[in-house]
Amino acid sequence: MSDRPDRTTVATELAATAPTAAASATATAAGAAAAATAGPRLLAGSPIAAEIRAGLVTDFAAFKERWGYVPTLAIVLVGADAPSAVYLQQILRTCEKVGVQGRLVEIGSDATADALCNEIERLNADPAVAGIIVQMPLPAGIPLRTVIDSIDPAKDIDGIHPRNAGLLSLGYDGFLPATAQASVEILKRSGIEIAGKRVVVVGRSNVVGKPAALLLLREHGTVSLLHSKTRDLGRHTRDAEILVVAAGKAGLITGAMLSPGVVVVDVGINVVPDGQGAERLVGDVDFESAKGVVSAITPVPGGVGPLTNALLLTHLLRAATDQAERGAAASAGGAPAAKGASR
Ligand code: NAD
């Protein structure tokens, strides 16, 4: 999961480029022809994220005023994974911007699963820590399930614990995986109707594709979930009125695999050579061939990524508030605080 910083604004570059002949040929409907000349609508996440962050500044200040402390987000990084480190620096910067304490907990790549779980237990028990995220992927040899299970569900602000995943699948309120939520939120906040639409999601990971499909179902989309074993991907993607792609494969979806006028959320973040000896970020959708076909599309970078971090911190606010209120109720009633209700 990464929205790496400060490369060229790919969205702007791509929006300025003329559509390809191949893409234009596919775009037969009148709406798509208009899109081919004007370019698609870009669904930018950054302005939405900025709006959410502005609200969080006020809300975290009010939290501090009411409860007398600044909540901490603990980020556990196992091993020195460079892309993860860059991504984590971004979250830490976002924490600073909204008035939250970010704490990076670095653990050596030779750590055992026990050592990692003990560290997580310490964070579970730390009353200042309101939320915990564990950066993925973990080094080979550390069982993911054991680590996920060790996170207190009340502090699991990226919704990876089975309790939160179960709540999502039942349609109840838990902590949502922030990227999946961002992919749906960007549609809703851009005024795109989901109810009744044919919605296709590519990718079925527990952190993005699967929860995104469940959230889109919650919004009354008619949802299909595609994955690496799906035969003839294009047959399914061409059926989509809304397409969410989270496969981690640069250029997987081309214009020929899209129907005219489709709305595309591109969650993928891939680093590819830019042809001039450097690298650039691209999504899973081949923007060049898609832009003459789609009616709207999220840019990469600048689409889903920025929104993910902002939403994560809204979860932190909720976790901190729940814990503070439960702690206060427990103190008032003399009952022991529930797990995670540390104050
Ligand atoms: P993952 O590797 O865990 O899962 C990828 C999924 O895509 C799998 O379910 C697989 O079945 C499917 N897939 C792979 N190749 C396919 C193919 N050829 N056809 C159909 N399906 C295929 O990845 P993930 O963690 O879900 O992340 C997906 C992408 O989203 C990555 O590019 C990742 O960097 C990006 N991501 C972005 C953010 C963000 O904030 N924008 C956050 C997390 C992940």
Image (cartoon, helix red, strand yellow):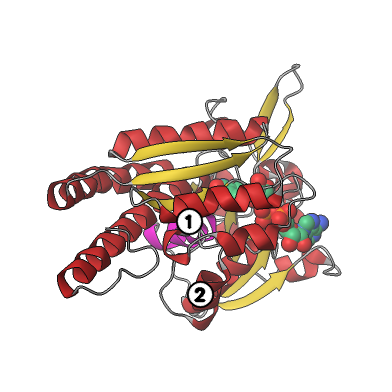
Q: Amino acid at mark 1?
A: Ala
- Locate the C terminus and report the quarter of the image it occupies: bottom left
Above or below, 5 against 103 in this view is above
Q: Is mark 1 within 8 Å of ligand 1?
A: yes
The residue to which callout 2 is attached is 168
Q: Nearer the viewer, residue 328 or 21?
A: 328
Left or right: residue 45 compared with residue 3: left
Above or below, 199 against 255 in this view is below
Q: Where residue 7 sits in the image (x, y, percent)?
A: 57, 25
Give me the C-alpha separation between circle 1 and circle 2.
Answer: 15 Å
Q: Nearer the viewer, residue 119 or 246?
A: 119
Answer whether residue 185 is magenta in the image: yes
**Residue 182: numbered disc:** 1
How many numbered marks does the figure carry? 2
Q: Quarter-wise, where is residue 228 in the image?
A: bottom right
Q: Where residue 12 sits in the image (x, y, percent)?
A: 52, 32
Judged from the image, the secondary structure of the residue bearing numbered disc 1 is helix
The residue under the point 43% across, 37% down is 103
Decide: few, some or many residues near mark 1? Use Cα within 10 Å; few <14, some 14-19, many ≥20: many
